[in-house]
Image: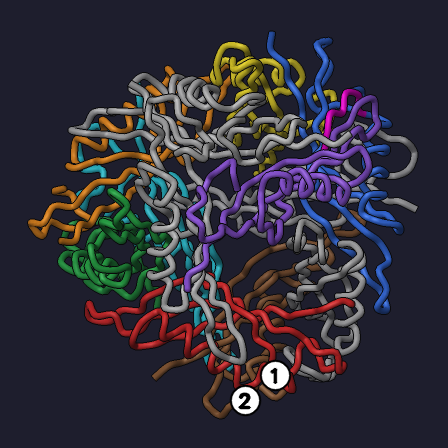
Chain colours: A purple, D orange, E green, F red, G yellow, H blue, J cyan, K brown
């Protein structure tokens, strides 16, 4: 049987660390997406003001499995 | 007149072949997206267990035209 | 506090110019997405017929901030 | 029935703008190539002298359809 | 003794499969180019209409050896 | 508990098809490597002689899990 | 005789257009760098607020020739 | 009004962690550059001796805004 | 005198963090490879189940010096 | 006035060295192409038999200016 | 009949030149690998001390054919 | 203790060879930069006139260590 997943890109920032930014991004995505399987960290960026790092930012490619119920490939109700 | 399309990334697996995986992925996407025009095969991957290929997997960048009804760019009702 | 954005890819064509295509693409995306912050022009393409340029096309990676209401990461109601 | 196109790379400069450079490049290519369908703008470059931009230059990957008459794939008479 | 080859890019479509598209592209190129040694499949694309795959398309970088007769590097008579 | 895998690159040719080349490459690798989990098809190439495709070639990045016995990371006895 | 140039990366924004951004960036660079020969436009980005494009931004790799006076390769007095 | 920034590449090592290396690199850059806005982490590398990680190294592309005083684009006094 | 090193790719996972995954991967490689000098972190990936990060995974390109004893370039006894 | 150039890819081998291969490739191209302005060395490859380097091979992207006589963009008579 | 090769990456330095580094790297690899067919020069690097070039370094992707004896894909006895 | 280096890009041409161009570029950079550790050859280019190679050109990414005296990261007095 075939299996289909979708890959979406998000960007998340934390004042703590890159790993916290990843956790925050995954948590936010998990509010509306079911079946998240993993994420590839595409970019690591730091934002800076007055010589201080103000946030740690990651761009993530998040993969989530689509179920077989005919739910939208690109959908809010996933 | 301007025309706008959206590009979304999906991943599809088949037990048969890469071409079957592509067909399955397009069929699944077509359940909820109208106006699919094409797909670029970004990656070809095989999954293996005990020395046997268990599935043929493709990552696809699928392009679909947005109609002019004001339907969401990133929407479940497409 | 963490902040999460999403990045979506669109393709827009104009009969006028690349910059008009960008404006059209952003306008169309803005019909359904709130919080658009910017776009990276990934590709510039011209379409041609009988030796004439019939449209100027851009592929855009559009970034928009997700609010904290628990709205879908990948959703029509954003 | 199969259909075959060829992709060739040209570089065009204009004293006016990038879009004029694209038009000039397509016009020059159209003197000897039939069936041009489109072009991807691979690079945008400006040439500068004494602090002034002297030309706007683009590198284009031009696609043109080969007809079925057995005309050369890589040929002057296209 | 030195040996020189040329690399040209073609795009071929088939209604059957990617492998048929490759065969068609090589056959068409072989009508006018002698000495083809190989081809790298740069891209795999499917074109879709009304939810059906209408053609399987490949972009190929074809390498062919130039003979020593002084034939043009970029020539119709190759 | 941590888990470590190794990724090795092989190139395989078949007279039949790309998919046969993949099967042959995986079979040959499986003679000496245990724990193969998958392979990414990095390149698809065709070799040609006298206008005919003589072989279908793939470059594969093969991933295999290292067991915990202290077997070599880069070893014949895996 | 040998000749040496340096390549530096700048980012410039304009409220008008990409081409104005390029002109502004080159003008600013020309205040302190002599011998600018050209620039490659590495990225095109638009910044957006409330659905409107607020600035057109380019990243430029600027090349400038170093004279033979022993002036610094990476220097304020260039 | 136009705004121009410069992007410079630095490499920083720490005996502690990647994040400490980033902080060290930004701190060192901030001794002589005003207006640093952010940095993209281009590469993560570990240096190893006798099986131990001796330093955590990052390559950073640092962006800093140029003020309007006519200070050098590529200058020590920025 | 010439010096030759080899570069091998491994993938390591940890339940703790990316940095722990790097340490685990280097430790496992060091069981069988002598002369490891460093590693480039090619990819950062998180694996997720039921909305939780289950492992932090890195792909590493590990460089190790080959001694002059004629030991195999690609060998278990290195 | 606009100026248009074409970029073609060749591969050249020499038994002597990479630089000899470049000279041979340029000389061969110059038999049929006028107005060659430069070449970018895209790849350096060595071919080996019985442990000996049998040839030094380069892939070159050769740029040549098209004159205004209406000569073919992709033509044998250039 | 199928044919399988392996691709391994080495890094070689010489005090003389890049071409000497390539010869040294191939010679060292040939002590333990049979059937080397070629190498792609992935990177050219110079190492410098006190303003002098101390070594010329290349990274090579070496391809060698695996024989049919069932010798290890990734093996010391090759 | 942390250590910070800077990476700058230069382009150097020689009438003799690529290796002479590298030596010339490093020598010119060494007039004003202390602590150069190495350079990566990003591009090899030949410039041609009337069918003859007029110069061999390299683009180099030069790495130099910043001392701890608080000297500018991007400075003429380095």
Q: Is residue D53 magenta?
A: no
Calculate the distance from the C-alpha at mark 1 to the C-alpha at mark 2.
Answer: 7 Å
Q: Is residue E7 above or below residue F22?
A: above
Query: Which portion, as a residue range, is magenta?
Result: H33-39
The quadrant the C terminus of chain K occupies is: bottom right
Mark 1, secondary structure of its residue:
loop
Question: In the drawing, does residue J54 fall left or right of residue K24?
Answer: left
In the current view of this chain or complex, which residue is farthest to the top?
H1
Q: Chain of mark 1?
A: K
Residue D5: where, in percent of width, then height?
22, 46
Q: Chain of mark 2?
A: K
Q: Which residue is mark 2?
A: K71
Residue D10: where, in percent of width, then height?
32, 36
- The answer to whether the residues at label 1 and label 2 have Cβ atoms under 8 Å apart is yes
Question: In the drawing, does residue H49 fall left or right of residue K67?
Answer: right
Q: Which residue is mark 1?
A: K75
The quadrant the N terminus of chain K occupies is: bottom left
Find residue E64 and report its image quarter: bottom left
Q: Is residue H37 magenta?
A: yes
Q: Is residue A10 above or below residue E1?
A: above
The one of F64 and J44 positioned closer to us in this rendering = F64
Residue H11: where, in percent of width, then height?
76, 43
Mark 2, secondary structure of its residue:
loop
- For the point 58% across and 17% down, the residue is G13
Residue J12: where, in percent of width, then height?
37, 59
The one of F20 and H37 positioned closer to us in this rendering = F20
The one of A3 and E42 positioned closer to us in this rendering = A3
């Amino acid at each position: 049987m075939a299996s289909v997943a979708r890959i979406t890109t998000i960007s998340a920032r934390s004042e703590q660390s890159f790993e916290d930014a990843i956790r925050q991004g995954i948590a936010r995505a998990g509010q509306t997406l079911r079946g998240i399987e993993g994420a590839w960290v595409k970019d690591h960026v730091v934002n800076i003001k007055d010589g201080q790092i103000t946030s740690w930012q990651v761009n993530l490619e998040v993969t989530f499995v689509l179920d077989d119920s005919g739910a939208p490939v690109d959908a809010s109700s996933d």
